[in-house]
Every structure is written in structure tokens, then in C-alpha cells.
DNA sequence: CGCATTTGACCGGCGC
DNA sequence: GCGCCGGTCAAATGCG
């Protein structure tokens, strides 16, 4: 199973919008507007949860098929994957970002099939994961905010993609071996493809920060809020605490109690969340991490 | 001044 | 053996 399967950010998440009574919002927002919005969000939440469950189901099915295939090829003494075909496909492939795993597998596999299969399993263990992040096409930065701190150590223009590929190491290196490659998709330049190699051996700094207290929120784009991953419930649940003080709101129009302003505020927050690439990046990282935990081989 | 980023040079693997 | 290519290094540069 290629880990490059798309994580549909728009459909695989469930949100728990925590609008507590202490928040700036509740102090000023009429109940009807909030209720409408919350009902709408709840409905979307249900739909998204169903879609997530469906995606997980399909993933499990594919995973079991792949395991069957692997065990059968082991029994027959055949190569686990058609490596030559993969190599040819690599040369022809439009999406040059899907080759890392195949490249690794295709090396030194001619001599011994068993060693080849071992190599595949080793590669799976190295935890190469891929995250796709929607950004504005005009945005030329290769920054995928995922909560961890990265140090850029190189940039290259690769052969079959005009967009440069940026190389990052975890800022905790050398103690943390994780590397990240970020490149725009050749097909859709508004999509950033982040390839993660290895696993962090330290906690996510942003979550450590979140745990320090209610006023230590994570900045998701222009919206200051705290974010935490709740894995105790059936699906990946991301809690956004919108009660965090928001400078933009504070500095906004003094007529903060007017219904027009409240509606504008709600719409603004909703659109900011859905459009902000850093928000989707953080969600993507959280989801991929969750998938890795849940379905690791 | 210290740190992060940029960018050209270098290295190793691979195919011809 | 040579050239191509992806990945990494490290000096130069920029920025707070």
C-alpha cells in the first residue's frame, strides 16, 4: 500500500468547536446565529465522520489485500512487487513525488528474493509518509506547518518537476533523525507534497506548548487558538478552543455587539479555518500521524 | 552577534 | 568510465 494515498482533508475530519462561555464570541454573539452555525457544523461533522469511517474501512481492506499478496509471493518465491515495472513507471510518471518508497525497494533486489522482501518490510518500518497540503498557487513558500520545528538544509530543482524541492531536518537533529521533503505537485501547483522519513523521538513542541496552559495557544494561521488531538473517541477528533483571546477581534470595530459584526466574525472564522493552508497542514499532519499509529504494520 | 536560510559544490548511486 | 540525478554539506548571506 502506497502511503501516498490522498488524505481528503475536507472530508476526513470531525470538528469539535468548543465555544465556551468564557469566550469572546459568546459574550457578544446572539444565540440564534450561533445555533444555526453550530447545527450546520454538527451536520457537516456527522457527514465527515461517516466519510472517515468509510475511508478507514477501505484502507483496512486494501491493507489486508496487500498483506495477502505479500504472503502469497513469499510462498511462491516471487518478487513481492514488479520492480522493473515500477522503475519504468517511475520514468514515465507525471507525479515524481511518489517514487521514494519504490526507489528504495528497487535497489539491490536482483540477487535474493527473500532479502528483497526483507528490504520492503524494513522500508515500511522506516515510516515514510506523505502529506498533501492545499495552498494558494501564488504562494511560493515551501513551508508546511505541522507543529514540529524544521531546519532547511537544501533545495533542489528535480528533473521532472519544475518546482524546487526543499529538504528539511528536524531541529532536534541529530538526536531526532526525521527528515522532510517538500515540493509542489507537478500536476497541481497549489498542492504541497510533504514527504516525512522516520519518526520523531520527542514530543510535538506545539502540543507541549498547548499543555502548558490555556493562554499558550497554537497560532493556526491568523487565528490564535489552542489545538489538541483527542484520540480517545472513535475517530480523530481535533478540538479547537476558540475562546483564546484574538487580537484581531479586540482591535476590530468598537461596535462589537452589532449583529452584522457578529455574523461577519463567524463567517470570517469559518472561512479562515477552511482556507488557511497552515490549518490544513496541521490537520493533515495530525491525521497522518493518527493513521500511522492506528495502521502501522 | 547568533541563528536560520540560501545556494553552489560535492558525493554516491545508477544507467548506458 | 562517464554522465545524470537526487541528496547533503558548508560557506555566504540575511535577518532579528
Image (cartoon, coloured by chain):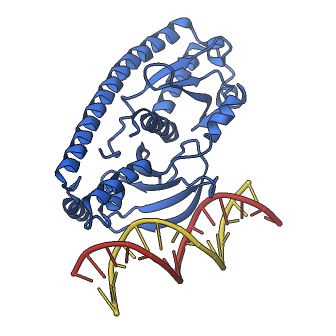
Chain colours: A blue, B red, C yellow
Determine the residue positioned at 20% across, 57% down.
Answer: A82
Determine the residue positioned at 53% across, 66% down.
Answer: A154
Up/down of A249 relative to A285, above or below: above
Quick check: A296 left or right of A144? left
Image quarter of the N terminus of chain A: top left
Image quarter of the C terminus of chain A: top left
Quick check: A118 left or right of A287? left
Along the line of sight, the residue nearer the viewer: A118 or A280: A118
Along the line of sight, the residue nearer the viewer: A295 or A211: A295
x%, y% of residue A130? Answer: 40, 47
Along the line of sight, the residue nearer the viewer: A9 or A290: A290
x%, y% of residue C3? Answer: 33, 85
Residue A87: in sight, yes or no? yes
Q: Quadrant of residue A173?
A: bottom right
x%, y% of residue A259? Answer: 56, 13
Up/down of A162 relative to A142, above or below: below
Up/down of A258 relative to A228, above or below: above
x%, y% of residue A52? Answer: 35, 26
Determine the residue positioned at 40% across, 61% down.
Answer: A163
Quick check: A140 left or right of A94? right
Amino acid at each position: 500500500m502506497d502511503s501516498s494515498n490522498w488524505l481528503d482533508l475536507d472530508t476526513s475530519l470531525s470538528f469539535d468547536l468548543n465555544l465556551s462561555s468564557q469566550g469572546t464570541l459568546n459574550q457578544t454573539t446572539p444565540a440564534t446565529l450561533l445555533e444555526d452555525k453550530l447545527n450546520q457544523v454538527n451536520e457537516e461533522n456527522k457527514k465527515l465522520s461517516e466519510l472517515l469511517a468509510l475511508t478507514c474501512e477501505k484502507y483496512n481492506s486494501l491493507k489486508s489485500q496487500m498483506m495477502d499478496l505479500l504472503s502469497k509471493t513469499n510462498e511462491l518465491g516471487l518478487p513481492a512487487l514488479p520492480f522493473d515495472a515500477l522503475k519504468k513507471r517511475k520514468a514515465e510518471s507525471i507525479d515524481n513525488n511518489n517514487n521514494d518508497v519504490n526507489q528504495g525497494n528497487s535497489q539491490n533486489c536482483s540477487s535474493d528474493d527473500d532479502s528483497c522482501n526483507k528490504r520492503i518490510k524494513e522500508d515500511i518500518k522506516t515510516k515514510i509518509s506523505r502529506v498533501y497540503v492545499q495552498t494558494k498557487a501564488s504562494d511560493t513558500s515551501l513551508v508546511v506547518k505541522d507543529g514540529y520545528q524544521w531546519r532547511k538544509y537544501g533545495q533542489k530543482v528535480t528533473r521532472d518537476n519544475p518546482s524546487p524541492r526543499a529538504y528539511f531536518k528536524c531541529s532536534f537533529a541529530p538526536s531526532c533523525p526525521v527528515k522532510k521533503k517538500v515540493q509542489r505537485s507537478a500536476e497541481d501547483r497549489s498542492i504541497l507534497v510533504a514527504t516525512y522519513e522516520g519518526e520523531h523521538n520527542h514530543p510535538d513542541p506545539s502540543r507541549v506548548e498547548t499543555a502548558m496552559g490555556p493562554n499558550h495557544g497554537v497560532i493556526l494561521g491568523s487565528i490564535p487558538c489552542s489545538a489538541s488531538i483527542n484520540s480517545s473517541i472513535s475517530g480523530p477528533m481535533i478540538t479547537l478552543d476558540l475562546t483564546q483571546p484574538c487580537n484581531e477581534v479586540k482591535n476590530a470595530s468598537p461596535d462589537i455587539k452589532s449583529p452584522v459584526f457578529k455574523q461577519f466574525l463567524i463567517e470570517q472564522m469559518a472561512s479562515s479555518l477552511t482556507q488557511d493552508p497552515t490549518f490544513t497542514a496541521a490537520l493533515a499532519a495530525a491525521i497522518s500521524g493518527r493513521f500511522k499509529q492506528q495502521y502501522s504494520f
